[in-house]
Image: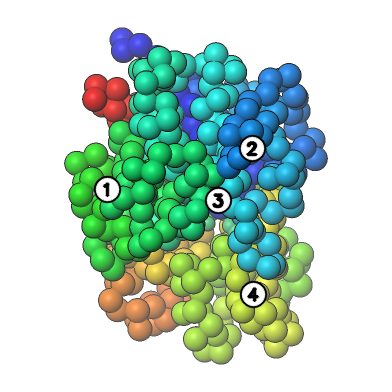
Amino acid sequence: MARPLNILFASPEAHPFAKTGGLGDVSSALPLALKQQGHDVRVIIPKYRSIGQSKRSVKPMGLTVAVPVGTKVKSGKLHEGRLNRTVPIYFVGRNEYYDRKEFYGDADGEFPDNAERYIFFARAVLEACKALDFQPDIIHCNDWQTGLIPCYLKTTFANDPFFENTRSVFSIHNLGYQGNFKKRYLPVAHLPRKVFSMEGVEFYGHFSFMKAGLVYADRLVTVSKTYSKEILTPENGFGMDGILRHHQSKLSGILNGADYGEWDPQIDVHIKTRYGPKSLNGKLECRKNLARKLSLKLPDQTPLICMVTRLSSQKGIDLIIQRFTDLMRQDAALVILGAGDDPYETFFNEQNQNYPERFRFIQGFDEKLAHRIIAGSDLLLMPSLYEPCGLTQMYALRYGTVPVVRRVGGLADTIKGFQSGKNQGTGFLFKPKEEHKWFPLLQKALALYSKKKVWRNLMLNGMKQDFSWEKAAKQYALLYRRALKK
Ligand code: ADP
Ligand code: GLC
């Protein structure tokens, strides 16, 4: 038996303490799955305001870390909680940076001090290892907010005996968010001048935290096989494709899992009636209950389409807006739960007035309602322009909610196209280059809803899919061991 590993999972968010999207889900589910496989895994995130206010137990540890930021040395207080009562999660507290309602920005845009907030966090993660006397074999970093950690390990801490055997893995969850800041933050981060080069953190004259992760991590991983190839192309590389091609030998793709401890209609604590493949009636109850709650008119033959999503252009929201009037002419109802860009929120809020019986937009982030909507709907629409993995479609499958998606990234790797006559497939996919076909495809799916037997089989095909984290966690453990051989 290979020895268990010491793993520190550094992330800007982790459910149920802090979540804005899929990264929050991954940052609790993957550590839990690794723990089950015997590893000593711990998670570390910033201590945002909501964490102090939650009912979950979060205790000060009496430990402080000191981080040089510009000309000052700033201190952070460590707090501790547990994920699912098993995995320790540490919170780096510093009110000046994290005692805010939102994590990354508010109505006025991104927080102007984001560079400083995540410089502090990155270095605090390393100082926390020392304060906790936890020597990680692997620090698993996630997205640009943690991108400086691999860079510190290879520079500032390169000769530090404490980290002599520590290797870093950097996960790309979304290349569209890069954390590119002004060059003047380099001395704020106390990084040597030499890292500001083409081979280092310099990106078109800016100091890129994402690039720092890509260049200095021992291993790179992204959240689906297809996305790991897409990001090597200029179309999907967000300017980083050349860098990624250069570092291709250390890049791999591991498909995210779905946390069935949270997302399974047979045990879901949030939904009205529990159900499963052998007791589908519960889904009808959930549907009725949802329609009542949202005051939607939903006769039995009318399918309910849903979206639970960040409202950003990534998610293909423009397609919905372009065909909204046509969509409202179908025998279908639509519910959208989402928060994000202003123009999208404004548009959907207006449509609430125009189509009160068949459309409902709920603006905001609501975990419980997300479960109820996915359980109570018949179809999930996810026409994302790009999708590194996507978790919502995997959850939808388990709830018998049939996905209609664009064949990109993780959507291509998780949804199998429905084939009429063969009783095969789990959803509907349109090709990225055939965007105009998405609406006829949706119409085709809607028409199938009246064919009760076919629809039932389609639902059951999806409900039987198994995307549990166990498999992914094993692949990560292998990846960590490969990083350690370096
Ligand atoms: P992304 O991480 O790009 O937002 P994913 O599909 O990977 O997309 O993950 C989205 C996660 O966030 C899912 O758990 C989904 O249920 C949740 N989510 C998205 N928007 C909302 C919302 N408005 N309210 C509640 N949960 C949401
Ligand atoms: C990002 C991606 C999403 C992915 C999630 C978790 O937010 O947009 O596709 O599922 O990270 O990896």
Query: Who's the residue at 23% across and 45% down the image?
Result: 247
Q: Which residue is mark 1?
A: 199
Q: Position of residue 197 (x, y in %)?
A: 31, 50
State the quadrant of the N terminus.
top left
Residue 133 visible in the current orientation? yes
**Identity, as a three-letter code, of the amino acid under mark 1:** Glu
Residue at the front extreme, as displayed: 71
State the image quarter where residue 358 is shown.
bottom right
Secondary structure type for disc 3: helix
Q: CA distance from mark 1 to mark 3?
A: 21 Å
Q: Which mark is residue 300?
A: none
Tell me which label, 1 or 2, sits earlier in the chain: 2
Q: CA distance from mark 2 to mark 3?
A: 15 Å
Q: CA distance from mark 1 to mark 4?
A: 37 Å
Q: Which mark is residue 72?
A: 2
Query: Who's the residue at 62% across and 53% down the image?
Result: 113
Q: Please tell me which residue lies in front, 319 or 228.
A: 228
Tell me which label, 2 or 4, sits earlier in the chain: 2
Q: Residues within 10 Å of mark 2 (few under 14, many from 20)?
A: few
Residue 391 visible in the current orientation? no
Tell which tag, 2 or 3, sits nearer the viewer: 2
Q: Which residue is mark 3?
A: 115
Q: Please tell me which residue lies in front, 464 or 57.
A: 57
